[in-house]
């Protein structure tokens, strides 16, 4: 309501006092209080959660769901079927197979009461050299040890299509979100891969050149594709009329819906390490997966925090 | 809740005067203008319907002008100044010098791709330097700002210096690991510049005196650093980055939160750093390929798939 100013224009000296003039004061108050209390009305730190209506055990700020899982494993797969079934091609299904649920969070969205939601995802990825290269029980042969180099991994947050009717127009396929903030898709992704000096070039000796050149990589340690990184990313949702300042980075949700946000991945082996592709997550194809190591995802945490007012 | 007292007293027999009613009512109503607290309201009586959006928490992201969404990629080519940078060359779609095709071709093999690369590069250069993601917001209340940023950092295969097109250093853009060139294996060509580090060969302790090209990132709010990474070398060709910091904001201010980067050569052995814009150590000793004259260990840094957010907590 902002600043409340009492309107008593009808109360004039020398005029007859009407009943409605007095009762109107309370009418004005009631009107202003209904959806009108704002920061100008409240003393700093003057309210605590005892004042607020209990809504399904939660108040204005809450985390709807928090998943903490000890680990996942991704074994790269590709079209050639070298790996046994159970690992489906594609960035989303790659996390299913025999490893259980997707790392994902679903939450209900009611624009009447919800204003913003932040989905955060953090985890630790460990790729160890030449470990778990093949599905258990598989007798299929693998590549030479030295092939397991130059691996690159992308992890991203995919806003899944809305289930049921009343569509929000979110993407049906996990493509990189661009241009339209309402199109859904993969909104952020992060990549890890080693510098080739510590991977596939480390054992490729051409000493005559290097000695003169002074290339530091001749002192480098050959890590194959052994690497570890911490990932942390977020995607933000909000009703479109809440603020004008955030237009480009917040996914608008103006209709009641259920939102799913999933962790997706993409992996490559080869020259990919240099590339920043136009659409890096969309194809989901592990181009030379037979040469890749699996990765362990540990301490994965994906959660949603809603802000209502 | 403040103590409120009746300001005007009236008694039987007084003449009714409007200001007495007005003054007393205003005394009560003034509580609504910034003094409401838990003592004024019944328990669990305030619901969503009573409160305006953004009363307690506001989430603010970069606007379109400041490229907050993930489709932009920023290119730091060490051409601009020293120290922390909040601008960079920018390509809106990450279609970066048609990299897929170029990556599989031998150097200088396809002049059309060289031309395409040049056209693309000149487009980027013509666009000039753009702001890195930043969030501007007005604070109408004292409060707390939580600034978050996530993205990916890669070291480019190329060094972007468009002024060198097309007369020289084309190999800077076509640093391919394709088939052989002359008698040299492609890996030999690539190898010297795979790791952006420089060891002076006249030194006795070359590793100790080695300089590694590093990036460093920080978040600032109104010019004050609220989160800062350390020097990040290029041992990882690509790696994630996430920063989060908080700071109080004052009522009635215009605020700006930014992501900034700096790039420098760092010697872990000597604990000395040199700004990357000021030093481009040369690659020497490849006599069979004239193109390499003037080549450098320095490579561009790329920032992409970014997201930025300010959570403004108040009241």
Image (tube, coloured by chain):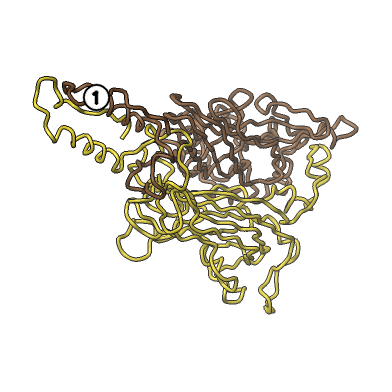
Q: Is residue A157 above or below residue A34?
A: below
Q: How many callouts does the rendering have?
A: 1
- Chain B, hue in figure: brown
User: Splitting the image into 4 quarters, where does residue B77 fall?
Assistant: top right
SS label for mark 1: loop
Residue denoted by label 1: B10
x, y percentage for residue A8?
19, 27
Q: Is residue A146 left or right of residue A185?
A: right
x, y percentage for residue B275?
69, 26
x, y percentage for residue A171?
39, 57
- Chain A, hue in figure: yellow
x, y percentage for residue A270?
64, 56
| Category of crowding for the residue at label 1, using alpha-carbon neighbours closer than 10 angstroms: few (below 14), some (14–19), many (at least 20) | few
The one nearer the camera, B63 or A9, is A9
The one nearer the camera, B109 or B162, is B162
User: Splitting the image into 4 quarters, where does residue B152 fall?
Assistant: top right
The one nearer the camera, B172 or B305, is B305
Q: Is residue A204 left or right of residue A76?
A: right
Q: Is residue A185 above or below residue B212?
A: below
Q: Can the viewer see residue A181 in this picture?
A: no
Residue shown at the point (80%, 42%) measured from the top left: A210
Residue shown at the point (41%, 33%) measured from the top left: B65
Q: Is residue B114 above or below residue A74?
A: above
Residue shown at the point (70%, 35%) measured from the top left: B213
């Amino acid at each position: 309501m902002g600043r409340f100013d009492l309107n008593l224009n009808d109360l004039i000296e020398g005029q007859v006092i009407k009943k409605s003039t007095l009762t109107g004061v309370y009418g004005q108050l009631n009107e202003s209080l209904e959806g009108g209390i704002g920061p100008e009305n409240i003393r700093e730190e003057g309210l605590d959660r005892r004042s607020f209506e209990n809504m399904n055990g939660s108040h204005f700020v809450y985390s709807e769901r928090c998943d903490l899982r000890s680990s996942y494993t991704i074994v790269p797969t590709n079209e050639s079927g070298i790996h046994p079934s159970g690992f489906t091609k594609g960035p989303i299904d790659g996390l299913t197979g025999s490893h259980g649920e997707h790392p994902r969070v679903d939450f209900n969205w009611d624009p009447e009461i919800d204003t913003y939601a932040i989905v955060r995802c953090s985890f630790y990825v460990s790729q160890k050299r030449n470990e778990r290269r093949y599905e258990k029980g598989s007798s299929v042969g693998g590549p030479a040890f030295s092939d397991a180099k130059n691996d690159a991994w992308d992890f991203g947050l995919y806003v899944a299509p809305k289930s049921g009717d009343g569509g929000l127009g979110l993407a049906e396929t996990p493509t990189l979100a661009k241009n339209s903030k309402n199109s859904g898709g993969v909104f952020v992704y992060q990549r890890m891969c080693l510098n080739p000096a510590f991977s596939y070039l480390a054992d490729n000796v051409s000493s005559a050149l290097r000695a003169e050149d002074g290339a530091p990589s001749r002192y480098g340690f050959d890590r194959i594709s052994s690497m570890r990184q911490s990932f942390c990313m977020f995607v933000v949702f909000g009703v479109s009329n809440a603020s004008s300042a955030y237009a480009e980075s917040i996914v608008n949700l103006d209709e009641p819906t259920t939102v799913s946000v999933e962790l997706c991945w993409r992996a490559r082996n080869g020259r990919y390490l240099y590339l920043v592709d136009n659409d890096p997550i969309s194809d989901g194809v592990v181009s030379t997966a037979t040469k890749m190591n699996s990765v362990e995802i540990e301490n994965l945490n994906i959660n949603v925090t809603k802000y209502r007012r | 809740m403040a103590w409120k007292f009746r300001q005007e007293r009236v008694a039987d027999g007084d003449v009714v005067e409007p200001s007495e009613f007005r003054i007393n009512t205003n005394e009560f109503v003034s509580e609504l203008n910034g003094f409401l607290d838990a003592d004024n309201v019944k328990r669990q009586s305030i619901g969503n319907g009573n409160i305006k959006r953004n009363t307690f928490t506001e989430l603010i992201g970069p606007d379109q002008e400041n490229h907050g969404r993930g489709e932009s990629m920023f290119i730091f080519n060490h051409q601009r100044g020293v120290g922390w940078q909040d601008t960079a060359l920018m390509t809106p779609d990450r279609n970066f010098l048609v990299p897929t095709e170029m990556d599989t071709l031998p150097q200088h093999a396809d002049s059309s791709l060289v031309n395409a690369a040049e056209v693309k590069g000149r487009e980027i250069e013509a666009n000039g330097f753009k702001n890195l993601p930043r969030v501007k917001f007005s604070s109408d209340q004292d409060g707390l700002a939580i600034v978050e940023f996530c993205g990916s950092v890669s070291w480019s295969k190329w060094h972007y210096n468009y002024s060198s097109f097309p007369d020289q250093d084309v190999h800077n853009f076509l640093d391919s690991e394709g088939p052989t060139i002359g008698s040299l294996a492609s890996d030999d060509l690539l190898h010297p510049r795979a790791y952006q580090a420089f060891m002076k060969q006249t030194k006795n302790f070359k590793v100790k005196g080695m300089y590694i090209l590093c990036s460093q990132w920080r978040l600032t709010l109104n010019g004050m650093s609220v989160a800062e990474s350390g020097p990040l070398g290029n041992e990882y060709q690509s790696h994630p980055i996430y920063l989060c910091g908080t700071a109080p904001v004052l009522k009635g201010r215009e605020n700006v939160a930014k992501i900034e980067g700096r790039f420098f050569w760092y010697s872990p052995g000597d604990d000395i750093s040199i700004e990357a814009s000021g030093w481009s150590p040369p690659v020497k000793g490849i006599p069979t390929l004239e193109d390499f004259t003037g080549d450098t260990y320095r490579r561009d840094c790329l920032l992409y798939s970014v997201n930025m957010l300010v959570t403004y907590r108040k009241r």
